[in-house]
Image: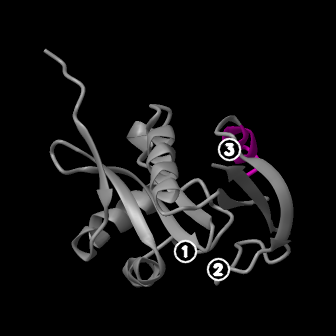
Amino acid sequence: MNRTPTLAIRPATSTDIPPLVEMVNAAFSIETFLEGTRTDAERLTSTLEKGEILLAEDDQGHIMGSVYIEIRGKRGYMGMLAVAPAHQGSGLARRLLTAAEDFFRHKGCEVIDISVLSLRPELIPIYKRFGFAACGTEEFGFARTFRDEDAECHCILMEKNL
């Protein structure tokens, strides 16, 4: 008999970093326009010093998805929403987003900010369905290089009122 695994969403700890790196890199493997992997242990450790990562795991302890959350005054920043390839399209991203929203509301935030790479235009309508609206752009400022040196990329800023 098939049963749906129990899903728990909890804050990541330093012991979660190795499997989290693997899952995030698999989830972002579509970003072939960037050199290297999406993240590594050093970057995730640094990320955890600024904010938190909520992770979703099944009842066997397998990480199925994650999202980075950071409080910035009355605004919450959400980034690196990742779902393991085998679970994409299952509604897990929405569950992680709901958990992030609940976290931000509990901390007194009024708005959630995200940034989406212009080279990932397929994400814009997904975030719009989640209630986000485009509110500006900014220069791509991450320490990453593009496979194509002439690639043009910027960040599309989006926000959602809580």
Structural crowding at the residue carrying mark 2, measured as other residues with C-alpha within 10 Å and reported as few (<14), some (14–19) or many (≥20): few
- From mark 2 to mark 3, how far is it between C-alphas? 23 Å
Instruction: For marks 2 and 1, give the one nearer the viewer.
Output: 2
Q: In the picture shown, does residue 51 fall above or below 155?
A: below
- From mark 2 to mark 1, how far is it between C-alphas? 8 Å
Mainly helix, strand or loop, the magenta region?
helix
* Image point (51%, 39%), residue name: 94
Secondary structure under tag 2 reads loop
Secondary structure under tag 1 reads loop
Amino acid at circle 3: Tyr
**Side of 152 relative to 76 (left or right):** right
Structural crowding at the residue carrying mark 3, measured as other residues with C-alpha within 10 Å and reported as few (<14), some (14–19) or many (≥20): some
Q: Within the magenta stretch, is there residue 121?
A: yes
Locate the N terminus by quadrant: top left
Secondary structure under tag 3 reads helix
**Pointer 2 with pointer 1, Cβ within 8 A:** yes
Measured as percent of width and height from the top left, residue 48 is found at 40, 77
Q: Earlier in the sequence, mark 2 or mark 3?
A: 3
Q: Which residue is mark 3?
A: 127
**Side of 25 relative to 76 (left or right):** left
Q: In the picture shown, does residue 136 fall above or below 128?
A: below
Measured as percent of width and height from the top left, residue 91 is found at 47, 33
Q: Which residue is mark 1?
A: 36
Q: Earlier in the sequence, mark 2 or mark 1?
A: 1
- From mark 3 to mark 1, how far is it between C-alphas? 26 Å
Residue farthest along the top direction in this orientation: 1
Measured as percent of width and height from the top left, residue 87 is found at 40, 38
Q: Which residue is mark 2?
A: 144
Quarter location, residue 95: top left
- Numbered range of the magenta stretch: 120-128
